[in-house]
Image: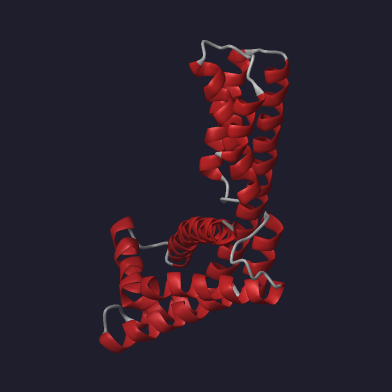
């Protein structure tokens, strides 16, 4: 039994770690992509949209995209090691923030951009005048990306607070046996879960609430749950 519990715990850690990795690859990747796009538009104001797209595509297709997810993984792993996170998963947003800062995500983006631009110069996909403008204005792109990452972390903190408020509102509605309010807060909870980074304690609490909610809903809104049903709701979370 002990071995089975240990394996289940390990599997759960791996699942949470994978979900967090996917979340950060998507979120940080999107921020970097947007920052690159905005930077090119600012540095080359006389170029039309199609030309900007072609320039950006050339950068992405010349090694920038391939190295991005690898760079994000390496940065997060380095940050986790520096923070002594040996479970593989973040417990809170503060840990994620410190890992991103410690791991040097901006330095990795800078190196990836340099590498792509050098490759473009070698194969002549863009004129050297364009790549030189981007190289000279690289810090503007990096500053924009850094600012947007900081904004994302702040937004995550706010979203988590809103999530926790909805959890508390649901619990209060449950005590008052107000199912309509519970239903509204359940929708809010699920909406916030789609926006925030997967954190084990938040997911577990949301699932406990959802299990109890569904028990009441499927039992004709009967709030008289016995101890066995409540215990099962906690175990299945």
**Above or below, comparing residue 235 to residue 179 in the picture:** below
Q: Quadrant of the C terminus?
A: top right
Where is residue 117, by image quadrant? Answer: bottom left
Q: Nearer the viewer, residue 178 or 33?
A: 178
Residue at x 71%, y 72% (from the top left corner): 83
> Is residue 188 visible to us here?
no
**Above or below, comparing residue 142 to residue 189 in the picture:** below
Residue at x 68%, y 55% (from the top left corner): 92
| Display colour scheme | secondary structure
> Is residue 43 visible to us here?
yes
**Above or below, comparing residue 157 to residue 7 in the picture:** above
Question: At which x and y percent is residue 89?
Answer: 60, 62
Residue at x 30%, y 72% (from the top left corner): 61
How many numbered circles are shown? 0
Horizontally, residue 120 falls left or right of residue 173, namely left
Where is residue 50, by image quadrant? Answer: bottom left
Residue at x 30%, y 89% (from the top left corner): 122
Horizontally, residue 226 falls left or right of residue 47, namely right
Q: Nearer the viewer, residue 194 or 50?
A: 194
**Above or below, comparing residue 74 to residue 38 in the picture:** below
Q: Quadrant of the N terminus?
A: bottom right
Farthest residue in the front direction?
A: 1
Q: Nearer the viewer, residue 151 or 5?
A: 5
Farthest residue in the bottom direction?
A: 122
Question: At which x and y percent is residue 34?
Answer: 46, 58
Q: Nearer the viewer, residue 191 or 51?
A: 191
Question: At which x and y percent is residue 214?
Answer: 52, 24
């Amino acid at each position: 039994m002990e071995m089975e519990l240990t394996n289940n715990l390990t599997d759960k850690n791996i699942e949470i770690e994978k979900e967090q990795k996917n979340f950060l690859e998507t979120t940080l990747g999107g921020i970097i992509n947007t920052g690159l796009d905005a930077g090119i538009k600012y540095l080359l104001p006389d170029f039309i949209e199609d030309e900007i797209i072609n320039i950006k595509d050339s950068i992405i297709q010349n090694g920038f995209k391939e190295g991005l997810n690898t760079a994000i993984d390496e940065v997060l792993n380095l940050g986790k090691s520096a923070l002594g996170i040996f479970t593989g998963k973040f417990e809170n947003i503060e840990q994620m923030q410190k890992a991103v800062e410690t791991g040097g995500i901006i330095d990795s983006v800078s190196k990836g951009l340099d590498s792509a631009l050098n490759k473009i110069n070698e194969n002549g996909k863009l004129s050297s005048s364009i790549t030189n403008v981007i190289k000279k204005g690289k810090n503007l792109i990096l500053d924009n990306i850094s600012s947007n990452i900081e904004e994302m972390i702040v937004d995550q903190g706010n979203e988590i607070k809103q999530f926790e408020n909805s959890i508390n509102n649901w619990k209060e509605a449950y005590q008052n046996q107000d199912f309509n309010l519970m239903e509204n807060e359940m929708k809010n909870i699920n909406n916030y879960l789609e926006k925030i980074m997967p954190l084990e304690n938040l997911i577990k609490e949301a699932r406990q609430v959802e299990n109890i909610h569904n028990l009441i809903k499927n039992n004709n809104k009967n709030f008289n749950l016995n101890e066995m049903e409540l215990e099962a709701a906690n175990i299945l979370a």
